[in-house]
Amino acid sequence: MRNILVFALALILLAGCAQQIRIVYENGTQNVILEKDTSPPKVEDISINNSNVQAPNESVKETPKTSKPSKAGELMLGPIQLSTMIPEPNQNLTVKFQFFNKGTSGLDDVGYSVSISQGNKTIASDEGIHNSTIAVNSSASVESKFKIADIGSYNLTVKIDPENQISEENELDNKKTLLIAVKKVYAPLTTHASSSQPCVDSDNGRNWTYKGVCQDLNEYQLGVTDSCESSSKLDEYYCKNNECVDETHMCVCLEGVCIQ
Ligand SMILES: [Ca+2]
Ligand SMILES: [Ca+2]
Ligand SMILES: [Ca+2]
C-alpha cells in the first residue's frame, strides 16, 4: 500500500499540478485526504501581486505632477504701459510690461498672458513664453498688440506665470488689471478760424467727454487741445468772446477727457 501511495504522489508532482496537497492519516488507517494548501502565498507571488497593483497607482501619481510647480523662484510684475488708455475702435493698442526675477537663481521659459475682457467674456488675449533666461535681479520686457472693435469699457489683465509653473512665496504680485475705455474721444478741427468765424471749437463748447481743439485768431492761432492738468482735473477749452478760453473740471481725467 505504501508503494502505491508513493507512486500516486509522484504522478501528481510530475503532472505539474499547482495545487499543493498534504497527506493525513485518519484513525491510524491509510486513508488519504487531498486538501488545498491554505498557507500564505510564496514571496514571489506577493511581488507579482504588488507589481500588478502598483501600475495604476503610479499612473495616478503622475497626473498631479504636471500641475505642480516645476521650479522655485520669485517673480514680480512691474508697471504696465499702454500706448493709450482710451483707444478708439480698431485703433492699435500696444501693451508693454516688465517682470522682475527677485529670486535666487536664473529663470527661463517664464510664461505670461495678457487678456482683455468685458465682464466674464474674454474679448482678446495673448499668451507666450519668454524664452531667454532672466538673471537674478534682472527684468524681461514683453509687448503685445491689440485692436478692439467695439466701443465700451474693458478690463486689461496681465499675468506672469499664469500656469503656476514656478512656485513663489508671493504669488499675489504676478497680476495687474487696468480699466480701459474704447470710444471716440478726439474731435479734430473740421473748419479753421477765419474773419467770419474768429473762434472755432471742434467739440462744440464745454464738452468733457471729447478731446477737442480750439482755435482763434489771437493767442491760439495754431489751436489748443483739451488736456488733463492732473489725473483728477481736466483743462477744457471753448470759445468765449471770439477767443479760446479754458476752465478746469474735476473728474477722472485721461488723455484730455473725463472717463468718469
Ligand atoms: Ca511673485
Ligand atoms: Ca471744447
Ligand atoms: Ca472737451
Image: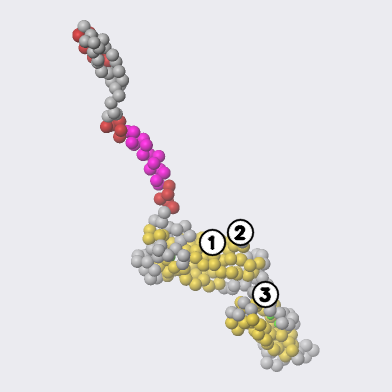
CA–CA distance in space, label 3 to label 2: 25 Å
Which residue, given by chain and number where applicable, does mark 3 sit on?
185
CA–CA distance in space, label 2 to label 1: 15 Å
Magenta segment: 48-62
- Judged left or right of residue 231, residue 166 is left
Residue 55 belongs to magenta span = yes
Amino acid residing under circle 1: Asp
| Most frequent secondary structure within the magenta stretch | helix
Out of 105 and 36, give the one closest to the viewer.
36
CA–CA distance in space, label 3 to label 1: 26 Å
Earlier-in-chain disc, 3 versus 1: 1
Give the color scheme: rainbow, by chain, secondary structure or one colour.
Answer: secondary structure
**Image quarter (top left, top right, bottom left or bottom right) of the C terminus:** bottom right
Q: Is residue 194 above or below residue 129?
A: below
Outermost residue, top side: 1
* Residue labelled 2 has its Cβ within 8 Å of some atom of ligand 1: no
Q: Is residue 61 above or below residue 180?
A: above
Outermost residue, right side: 196
Res. 16 in view: no
Which residue, given by chain and number where applicable, does mark 1 sit on?
126
Which residue, given by chain and number where applicable, does mark 2 sit on?
121
Residue 247: horizontal and vertical position, in percent?
Answer: 67, 86
Q: Quadrant of residue 253?
A: bottom right
**Residue depicted at x 70% and y 93%:** 218
- Judged left or right of residue 82, residue 220 is right
- Judged left or right of residue 61, residue 46 is left
Q: Residues within 10 Å of mark 3 (few under 14, many from 20)?
A: many
- Judged left or right of residue 195, residue 258 is left
Q: Nearer the viewer, mark 2 or mark 1?
A: 2
**Residue depicted at x 58% and y 63%:** 116
